[in-house]
Amino acid sequence: MNTDVDVLIAGAGPTGLLLANELGLAGVRTAVAERLPRRTGQSKALNLQPRTAEVLDCRGWLEPLLNRSLALLPAGHFAGLPLNYGALETAFPYQVGIPQARVEEFLEDHLAEYGVPVLRGRELTAFQQDADGVTATLLGPDGTESTVRAKYLVGADGGRSTVRRVLGVPFPGRDGRIGMAIADVELRPTDEAPGKPVVGYETHRRVTQVPGSNEVFAATEAGSDGTGEPWRLPDLSADPAGLAFLLPLGGGVHRLAFGGPEQGVDRDAPVTADEVRTALARCPGPPRELRAIRWASRFTDASRQAERYADGRVLLAGDAAHIHAPAGGQGLNLGMQDAFNLGWKLAAVARGRAPAELLATYHTERHPVGARVLANTRAQMALTLPDPDAMAVRALLADLLTTPEANHHIAAMIAGTDIRYPMPDAPDHPLLGARAPGVQLPSGRAALLADPTSATAAAVTEGWGDRVDCHGPLGPAADDDEALLVRPDGHVCWAGRNDNADSLRAALSRWFGATSWRRRVDAQTPGSGHVRPDQVGPGQVGPGQVSSGPVSPAR
């Protein structure tokens, strides 16, 4: 098949850019088509949840983003009710406060390492797929059209996705009932000093909890006046006048989020200065005067999810697959985790290392995760309504969340650390399907955590050494005589005894395709469905043999 690229991604937001990095890391020919001619610099989303931090850390991409962050907040919230992230089983028990624009900037710049182009000013307007690939039509800034041929197309082009529309995938759900707005605003300095952080603030990334209170703060970068303002969890208690809260973004700029009766307007209508001034007056703290609006947008609590995430050679990810209210700070994270789940699978299939059926697990695994986020965001928005019954439920939930068990359950859901994927046909184990935090996978390959002299390690070396690395000693929470097989996305897909090589081989075949020696011989012997060891040619590795040379990386 003659193609321009293996994978074409529509959309250069965090989802599309993280997916492009995953594919580039795997050596897949990839291009990103983006309608906008340049980055907007708009802050948009403001946080990375703990699971997203783990995802980025396992590739070695978190530290550069921490260096660009505004704050680390050791808590989450459910409709504004505090959640304790300090009790989560993770190396990153906090939200990373960072504008989406900085995440996008890092991910796009990092694509240069792999030679993956971002085709800015190129809007995908149409496509056709056939048995061998997809032909996409791109509209350039001067109105001219061009075509790109790819093996696969991924729509990461937002809630109003052209890819989803052309594909004809149903997008069931409901329209918005609650309107809100966000704005990045410049405020005139006041004579009153901002709220002082408690003792212990030393840098813009220190975090703390106010003694004797459940209120959590995170110090931010210094503002234009040289002082740092604290981040606070939003107060989303029901108020007939509407909600309003501020977060400092540094440099004298603040994020204002607000909603109320005045938001029952067209979502595409511009946010006015009068609306912003009214909302500022409702914010806690000293009076503030508006200097300028840098950027503003409206949104609703519309909740919809694509009926299927894949159709033939076209896949959907991020907001193209699901939209919901930004309650709890989950949206950007849900999309980036879609990309992390899809990336290694799409790379394996596009490079012929795994059968196309592997891509079906993307929908199987991620659709339920998206559905759960849609459900919890609907629940959160209901708890912010100035309705007596909703307020009664909110009071009951606030009381429940004072118990550690209930708080931990909801905190893990919002943080994304409780995600567990189904692993059919694998032997049952407490870690099966769960994430393996702390396992470093910078190459983007899978890892076997096992005794390097064991039968399981030998099985990997014999047949899958070009796709699976052997790590030792054992990783999280496994017994001394156990081995764990960790997928490139950090989830455990097999766990068993070190001597159970046959069971491991079945899992390796399911997730990572045929053995290396079999794929090489099959490629040289058309029509061969089974190859005996004596058919393996010189320099090839057959069953029961261990390569004497170094294993080449899966690039």
Image (tube, helix red, strand yellow):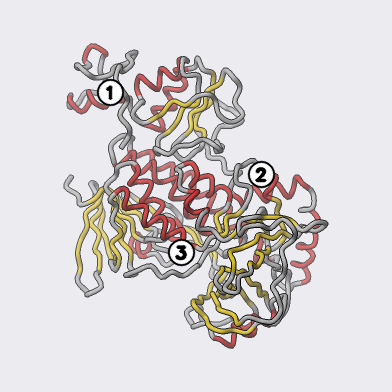
Instruction: Name the amino acid type tagged 2.
Output: Leu
| Mark 3 and mark 2 residues within 8 Å of each other at the beta carbon | no
Please rate how many residues cluster around mark 1, counting C-alpha atoms within 10 Å: few if below 14, some from 14 to 19, many from 20.
many
Residue at left offset 34%, top offset 52%: 111
Q: Is residue 73 left or right of residue 153?
A: right
**Looking at the rendered structure, which numbered label has been put on residue 101?**
3
In the picture of the structure, the residue carrying the numbered disc 2 is 88
Q: Earlier in the sequence, mark 3 or mark 2?
A: 2
Residue 156 or 372: which is nearer the viewer? 156
Residue 445 or 536: which is nearer the viewer? 445
| Mark 1 and mark 3 residues within 8 Å of each other at the beta carbon | no
In the picture of the structure, the residue carrying the numbered disc 1 is 518
State the separation of the CA atoms marked 2 and 1: 43 Å
- Mark 3 residue element: helix
The residue sitting at the bottom extreme is 274
Q: Is residue 538 above or below residue 243?
A: above
Q: Nearer the viewer, mark 3 or mark 2?
A: 3
Q: Earlier in the sequence, mark 1 or mark 3?
A: 3
State the separation of the CA atoms marked 1 and 3: 45 Å
Q: Position of residue 137 (x, y in %)?
A: 24, 63
Please rate how many residues cluster around mark 2, counting C-alpha atoms within 10 Å: few if below 14, some from 14 to 19, many from 20.
some
Q: Is residue 530 left or right of residue 453?
A: left
State the separation of the CA atoms marked 3 and 2: 28 Å
**Looking at the rendered structure, which numbered label has been put on residue 146?**
none
Instruction: Name the amino acid type tagged 1.
Output: Arg
- Mark 2 residue element: loop
Q: Is residue 316 above or below residue 265?
A: above
Residue at left offset 42%, top offset 64%: 158
Please tell me in which quadrant of the rendered image residue 436 appears.
top right
